[in-house]
Amino acid sequence: MNTTTEKAYAKINISLDVTAKRPDGYHDMLMVMQTVSLCDDIEVSLVENQRSSATCNLHFVPTDERNLAVKAAEKFFKAAGIEGRGALIKMHKLIPVGAGMAGGSADAAAVLRALNRLCGRPFDEKALCDLAGEVGSDVPFCIAGGTMLATGRGEILSPLPELPHCSIVICKPEFSTSTPELFRKLDAIKLRCHPDTNGIIEALESGDLVKLSRRMYNVFEDVPDRRHSTIAEIKSTMLDCGAMGSIMTGTGSAVFGIFSDDAAAQGACEKLKKEFKLCYTAKDQPRLEV
Ligand code: ATP
């Protein structure tokens, strides 16, 4: 076998906190992360004597080494000591780009899982996560996904009890946010509020979706930005339609809402679609066996 397929699942941040700016320029993060069923489809084929390359249904996504999936493939072969081989990666993207849903990182992780399988599993899960960390901060989480507490730059992971089953509505406004710019703006302000991360962990431990939804919080929503009125509008629509909680994910610009009722989620999605093109319903996605 030299071709395989993988699903690359998107992530949402149930909470996102920035706890410190580090001397190396990175920030210390404290995040509860969750994979959702919204995914890209990735096909990976092993090829002889060719460099790794990608094709993508979205013309504005780079398909050379700037694509995290291609970067992941090159790192994989180098770390595994495999010479004269490359990966042909066909990507069909559904995850909105520049949304704070780790789309590129999910694709990179899917390629690492696929290549590990095609090449006779040279890496165990821990080694694959270490390799993923060299590709990007969110890539280790995307290797197995599920419900995780992420610290450090986001690469230090501890499994949490699974999110109780729910419907998740995702809406991405037309604009995207620049992650470096958002961190610069965050450095210039004093954060007044932080998520109750321990409260969220307790809610997961007791399987209490109401308690969890009420505590969801993302400090990037406190960074002044004139476009936050759009974020607020989406959140209000989600809550008016019955969401138990709604926040922006990652550095945005996508917003999600948690619903206990599938029909209410569907209703919210249809209402938002009248104004925003990129709206989706999804489910919580459990941790993968790697
Ligand atoms: P994160 O949540 O990790 O901050 P994001 O969801 O905000 O990420 P992505 O969708 O991963 O952002 O894409 C951000 C940029 O990364 C894009 O503008 C694109 O140029 C580049 N990129 C590299 N590889 C990919 C990929 N496989 N899919 C999408 N974008 C990619």
Image: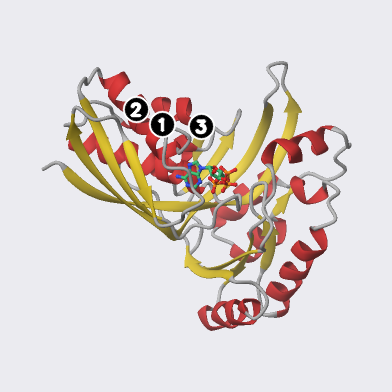
Question: Identity of the amino acid at label 2?
Answer: Glu
Whole-percent x, y for residue 192 in the image: 88, 43
- In depth, the one of 231 and 276 nearer the eye is 276
Q: Are marks 1 and 2 in contact (CB under 8 Å)?
A: yes
The numbered dot on residue 136 is: 3
- The percent position of residue 141, horizontal first and vertical second, equals 47, 39
- Based on the displayed image, in which of its 4 quarters is residue 128 positioned? top left
Instruction: Pick the residue in front: 36 or 162.
Output: 36
Residue in the image at 18% along x and 45% along y: 3
User: How far apart are the alpha carbons under marks 3 and 1?
Assistant: 10 Å
Mark 3 lies on a secondary structure that is loop
Q: Residues within 10 Å of mark 3 (few under 14, many from 20)?
A: some
Residue drawn at x 39%, y 49% as measured from the top left: 287
Residue at the disc numbered 2: 74
- Tell whether 84 sits left or right of 158: left
Assess mark 1: CB under 8 A from ligand 1?
yes
Of residue 266 and residue 207, the one placed in the foreground of this image is: 266
Q: In this view, does 281 lie above or below 19?
A: below
Residue that carries the numbered disc 1 in the rendered image: 71
